[in-house]
Amino acid sequence: MAVSVDPSCLYTETHEWVRVDGETAFAGITDYAQDQLSDIVFVEMPEVGDEFGKSDVYAVVESVKAASDCYLPVSGEVIETNEELEATPEVVNASPYEQGWFVKIALSDPDELEGLMSPADYQAYADKAEAEGSH
């Protein structure tokens, strides 16, 4: 399977993405991550108003294979959660970058974005991980 990458996102080595829109950003897991997890059956989300530092665990994804922590790519306060995932977590498998986003956050430190991978860098990283058969 070719790893799908959204050109409007920035990425982490732990297979999370962030898409910035002004002072806010959406975050979720990548196509590679959802593919590795297989059929997602539950997403444990944070509460609106929760604050997280960069790389803090902010959500847990459960699949038929395993439960995995999700790490927030940048610091911020949760201002919205994707409530659709409560009833239909499989949306993350079908559309990890669009309908399958997890949270919308108010950015605390936009400078943190500079440490994230570009779409091209992440594509190469994920393709290498897939070729090696690792996560």
Image (spheres, rainbow, N blue to C red):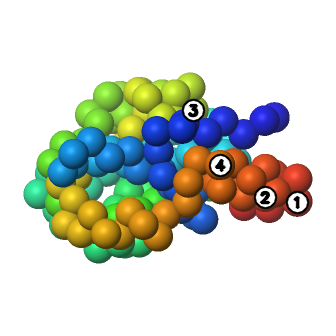
Quarter where residue 135 is shown: bottom right
Question: Are the residues tagged 1 and 3 within 8 Å (C-beta)?
Answer: no
Residue 134 is situated, as x and y percent measured from the top left of the image, at: 80, 61
Residue type, mark 3 in image? Asn
From the image, tell me which residue sits under label 3: 93
Which is nearer the N-term, disc 4 or disc 3? 3
Question: Are the residues tagged 3 and 2 within 8 Å (C-beta)?
Answer: no
Q: Residue at x 72, y 58 (%)?
A: 125
* SS of the residue under disc 1: helix
* SS of the residue under disc 3: helix
Which is nearer the N-term, disc 3 or disc 2? 3
Q: How far apart, in angstroms, are the residues tagged by discs 4 and 3? A: 22 Å
Q: Residue at x 56, y 26 (%)?
A: 94
Q: For mark 3, does the 10 Å Cα neighbourhood hold few (<14), some (14 to 19), or many (20 or more) residues?
A: many
From the image, tell me which residue sits under label 1: 132
Residue type, mark 1 in image? Glu
Residue 2 is situated, as x and y percent measured from the top left of the image, at: 78, 35
Which is nearer the N-term, disc 1 or disc 4? 4
Q: Is 84 located above or below residue 32 in the figure?
A: above
Question: Are the residues tagged 4 and 2 within 8 Å (C-beta)?
Answer: no
Q: How far apart, in angstroms, are the residues tagged by discs 3 and 2? A: 19 Å
Q: Which numbered tag is attached to residue 129?
A: 2
Q: Which residue is drawn at 56% across and 54% down?
A: 118
Which is nearer the N-term, disc 4 or disc 2? 4
Q: Residue furthest right?
A: 132
Question: Are the residues tagged 1 and 2 within 8 Å (C-beta)?
Answer: yes
Towards the viewer: 21 or 94: 21
Q: How far apart, in angstroms, are the residues tagged by discs 4 and 2? A: 14 Å
From the image, tell me which residue sits under label 4: 120
